[in-house]
Amino acid sequence: MKNLGKISIAMLLIFGVTATSNAQINDTSKPQIGVKGGLNFSNLHDNDVDDDNMLTSFNAGLYTNFPITNILSIQPELLYSRKGSESVYDNAIATGTAKFKLNYLELPVLLKINVADNINIHAGPYFAYLLNAKVTNETDSGDFDFEENYDNDDFNKFDTGLSIGLGFDLDSVGFGLRYNYGLSTVGKERTFAGETYTIPDGKNSTINVYLAVPLN
């Protein structure tokens, strides 16, 4: 996901700079409420996001949009969003697939800029609360079933991060691409054989592809 994330952010920034001078006024004088949902492509990173360990999942929820001017607006959202990672391992001990599924109630608060007719860029912080976590491990070795060692108490309840996205707003539907970069470590410290570890020690990194439907 390292290359995909960097390419997505670069495209958004270039597009915003080149299109702002051609921004047109949309009819955004009234607050809007709607529903939205889509796919998540997520993994866990330490500092350097890579393309490995990607988990495909989903997000769904509500959004509201409050105009400031004809070009600027504030858009808070309330989403159910599954994040985490998927790791395929093959070594001398065992082979299999381990999945960390982290289900969050997420609140992005975004500044939305209409850079052209029906086209916007948006960015801002997000805040998330972990509803529950599930660890699964599919392996051909019965001696390597570690998922029973994890429960909800092994993960931090709160997550924060930054979001940036590109959206297309039509009369009856909107769609777009968004990248979320987590700033909080997912796992808590645990002690094994007298040593202290943080497992998982990564932070959330997620690409959203979404569809939005206004209700008014």
Image: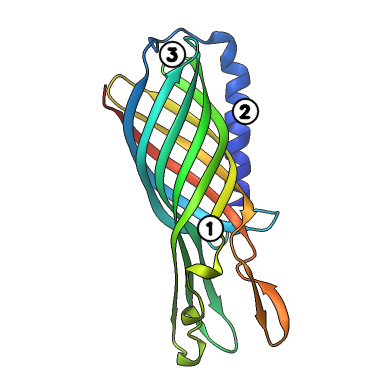
Residue that carries the numbered disc 2 in the rendered image = 13
Q: Residues within 10 Å of mark 1 (few under 14, many from 20)?
A: some
Which of the 4 image quadrants contains residue 78?
A: top left
User: In what element is the residue under mark 1?
Assistant: loop
Give the residue at mark 3: 117
Pointer 1 residue: 157
Question: CA gap, disc 1 to disc 2?
Answer: 32 Å
The residue lying at 26 percent from left, 26 percent from top is 215
Q: Residue at x 50, y 45 (%)?
A: 207
> Which of pointers 2 and 3 lies earlier in the amino acid sequence?
2
Instruction: Look at the picture and state if 56 lies above or below 64.
Output: below
Q: Are marks 1 and 2 in contact (CB under 8 Å)?
A: no
The amino acid type of the residue labelled 3 equals Asp
Query: What residue is rendered at 32% in x and 30% in y?
Result: 34
Q: Position of residue 180 (x, y in %)?
A: 55, 43
Viewer-nearest residue: 60 or 52: 60
Above or below: residue 37 compared with residue 197: above
* Residue 152 coordinates in the image, percent (x, y): 48, 68
Estimate the x, y position of residue 62 in percent, counting from the top left: 35, 36
Mark nearer the N terminus (1 vs 2): 2
Residue 57, percent across and down? 40, 55
Outermost residue on the top side: it is 25
The front one of 147 and 115 is 147
